Amino acid sequence: MTILSALARAYDRLPNAPPFGYSSEKIGVVVGLNHDGSVASVTDWRDGEGRKAQPRPMPVPQPVKRTAGIAPNFLWDKTSYALGVTAGEGRRTADEHRAFVERHLGDLGESDDPGLRAFLSFLTMWSPEQFTASPWQDDMKDQNVVFALESDRRANIFLHDRPAASAVWQRLSSRGSGREEICLVRGEPGAVARLHPSIKGVWGAQSSGAALVSFNLDAFTSYGHEQGDNASVSEAAAFAYTTALNRFLERDSGHRIQIGDASTVFWADAYEAGAAEEAEMLFPVFFDTVDQEQEAEEKIGAKRIRERLEQIRKGVPLEEVEPDLGKVQFYVLGLAPNTARLSIRFFHSGNFGELTRHYQQFVSDMRIEPPPREPFPPLWRYLRETAVLGKGENVTPNLAGEWMRSILSGTHYPLTLLSSVLTRIRADGEINVLRAGILKALLIRNFKSKEASVALDPANTNKGYLLGRLFAVYEHIQAAALGPKVNATIRDKFYGSASAQPRKVFHLLESGSANHLSKVGKQKPGYKVVLEKQVGAIMELMSPGADPFPASLSAEDQALFGLGYYHQRNEFFKKPAEAAVSRETDA
């Protein structure tokens, strides 16, 4: 199923979905009118207080698609249009308000509905100077405004809800409809949408919205067609898919997570609503923060969600955990900004059982000893390990989408992930648990490496792995000789060159370690012997004829170098703790 058809089907499952021709928009102010058009009340419709106040979503007539021109909405708009006031410079505010008044005088001039007549009277009597008096508040400027008869306002019936207004809007919406064609999304005849509604809520895109489907240059057209005529999507289908996508992109929709620069939405398509909802609750916990897990626990039940997650992460097939979930058809869509349009980073469709198996494989790939403090870190934490200064905005473009797509589909991880991690390790010399996990996962999935083990493998003879272990021992010898407060360790000075061009560095490290061992022997003769045995054990696994210190290492061997270094270095931290436990047991 295509992206548009899947989203159009999702519209039918939306709770409180706006009808065709309407859109859910954020409304901040409700103006109650008397029958003579005078203002009876002004209600702050936002939730919260002060700067945290947020406008509430409300179904209103679908907004016009604005570019650089002036185009008012029907029966609602921001204050610059509806009231002629704005918090900014307002160079064209008077023109915007004039266009708003003229539009409604023309569209509603013949109406005899009491609510619409009151609205027209308000427009003719209103002047922007009246905004300075009570009950208007300065922080209401630039909020979206709707209107209601005061007698209807308490029942939350607004002007655009009145039957007369709905009839006018239906007539206006059908005006200028494109010619009828077979819709490519639904396969039914319908008026072709020349312009599709904007998509809002994509991180980094324009706040006014961006287009998912558009044709704006002659190079994109064919047979003389213009705009949406090049892809015959009916107005009803365009409304359905954009409405569903905009709902999913809302901040608290429960259908979105942020993966790098990709705003990721997900939804289920199942006849059994309960199974679909549970799948939608589980998915974000796979890849996002602990907050998602807590939210899922509140909706599904703490015990139930913990049991499901624990079993899934242990590798138990979903068919055994919850058979009904495996049959749920599931969709994941990643979007990123591209000027006034949107780029599709990835799209995955398949049953939830297959998706869960791919997630379990990802968990297995990333498993490493010693493990991270947080057993299952969210994907964005791994991504930050590839970025300069560990900042999300510095993640390589497209990397997040490519990695997510490979996880969802069970294919090879992007090689840009390997180059990004190796670059960061060489730059800052930091081999932490998350970076080591990434290296191991890449070795297993992309290179089918049998040398990439979860924990230290003393029998591993891969030259990259052995050199990484040896480098960690040399570093430990330096620390034992000079103490932990060394201005610059051999890792700080030599890791980058040692992992890429060992021949240039290791002979120097070997002679340096001999001096450090001599110093250790003067203070702790027994410990010197232990360290010499560790170096010797690693050297014995090297084959002189196979060039133990090669001129260069491939990317695969550099990854094994980092993995070997991580395993060996953490082995030094484990042994004192294990010895302490042993002593307590003997006592």
Image (spheres, rainbow, N blue to C red):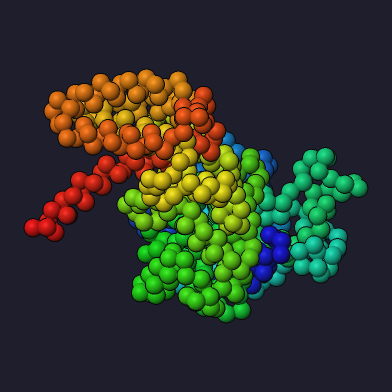
Q: x%, y% of residue 49? A: 35, 56
Q: Is residue 574 left or right of residue 175?
A: left
Query: 204 above or below 292?
Result: above
For the question of whether residue 401 can be seen, the reply is: no
Question: What residue do we see at 53% from left, 75% from top?
Answer: 319
Location of the C terminus (image quadrant): bottom left
Question: What residue do we see at 17% from left, 35% from top?
Answer: 526
Q: Is residue 28 left or right of residue 406?
A: left
Instruction: Please tell me how many numbered marks the rendered image carries.
Output: 0
Query: 424 above or below 156?
Result: above
Q: x%, y% of residue 484? A: 21, 31
For the question of whether residue 544 can be seen, the reply is: yes
Q: x%, y% of residue 416? A: 57, 39
Q: Is residue 8 left or right of residue 368?
A: right
State the residue lying farthest toward the right.
223
Q: Which of the two residues, 330 or 38, is positioned nearer the viewer here?
A: 330
Q: Which of the two residues, 290 or 423, is positioned nearer the viewer here?
A: 423
Query: 242 above or below 471?
Result: below
Location of the N terminus (image quadrant): bottom right
Question: What residue do we see at 63% from left, 40% from top?
Answer: 339
Q: Which of the two residues, 377 or 484, is positioned nearer the viewer here?
A: 484
Quarter-of-image position of residue 537: top left
Q: x%, y% of residue 21? A: 68, 64
Question: What residue do we see at 56% from left, 69% from top?
Answer: 353
